[in-house]
Amino acid sequence: MKTIEQLIQCLPQIGQVTWVSIRPERGGQVKVLEEVEVVENKGLAGDHYKGKADSKRHITLIQAEHLQAVASMLGRESIDPALTRRNIVVKGINLLALQNKQFQIGEAILETTGLCHPCSRMEENLGEGGYNAMRGHGGITARIIKGGKVRIGDEVKVI
């Protein structure tokens, strides 16, 4: 029988990037991209968070599967990822299982720094109940260990 620690370390799943965006201005419109330059210790090229080297929030990620769960709670068929204001949507890997791990997306290496909790904009963007629907489904924040390109279709895997 495996120990809990052994189970936590076992993550053979490989995810895939399905959506990429930046937010050029704080509170401004989300810009959807096919690829983005991920800058070591900074953030995403063109994103308003870029340049804060000591930040624990260089990049935000959310699971496509969680977007479906939130849509279901809100009685919708789907949710436009832009409404969540996250940088990258991935599918096929549990982002919460990446806690205390480094992982690779495309050319970049990231490290989970925490949960990405919903803000009051979720009520505005998703409608009444949007904030509570996003609770526990907001994804993760990460620090950029090594920069490089991230593209739609890139693999997401533990190093």
Image (cartoon, rainbow, N blue to C red):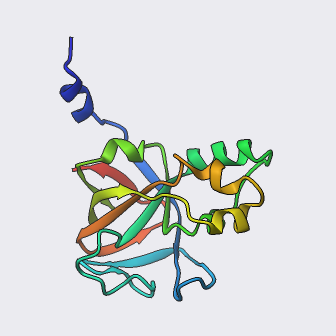
* Residue 126 percent location from the top left of the image: 72, 61
* Residue 59 percent location from the top left of the image: 39, 69
Q: Is residue 105 left or right of residue 26?
A: left
Q: Nearer the viewer, residue 125 or 103?
A: 125
The quadrant of the picture occupied by the N terminus is: top left
Q: Nearer the viewer, residue 144 or 14?
A: 144
Q: Quadrant of residue 147?
A: bottom left
* Residue 74 percent location from the top left of the image: 76, 47
Q: Quadrant of residue 124?
A: bottom right
* Residue 32 percent location from the top left of the image: 59, 76
Relative height, residue 123 to residue 35 (above, below): above
Q: Nearer the viewer, residue 44 or 150?
A: 44
Relative height, residue 47 to residue 1 (above, below): below
- Residue drawn at x 35%, y 74% is 149
Q: Nearer the viewer, residue 139 or 136?
A: 136
- Residue drawn at x 65%, y 48% is 133
Q: How many marks?
A: 0
Q: Is residue 22 left or right of residue 105?
A: right
Relative height, residue 27 to residue 129 (above, below): below
- Residue drawn at x 29%, y 47% is 99
Q: Quadrant of residue 19?
A: bottom right
Q: Is residue 61 left or right of residue 43?
A: right
Relative height, residue 105 to residue 67 (above, below): below
For the view shown, which residue lies furthest in the top direction?
Answer: 1
- Residue drawn at x 31%, y 87% is 51
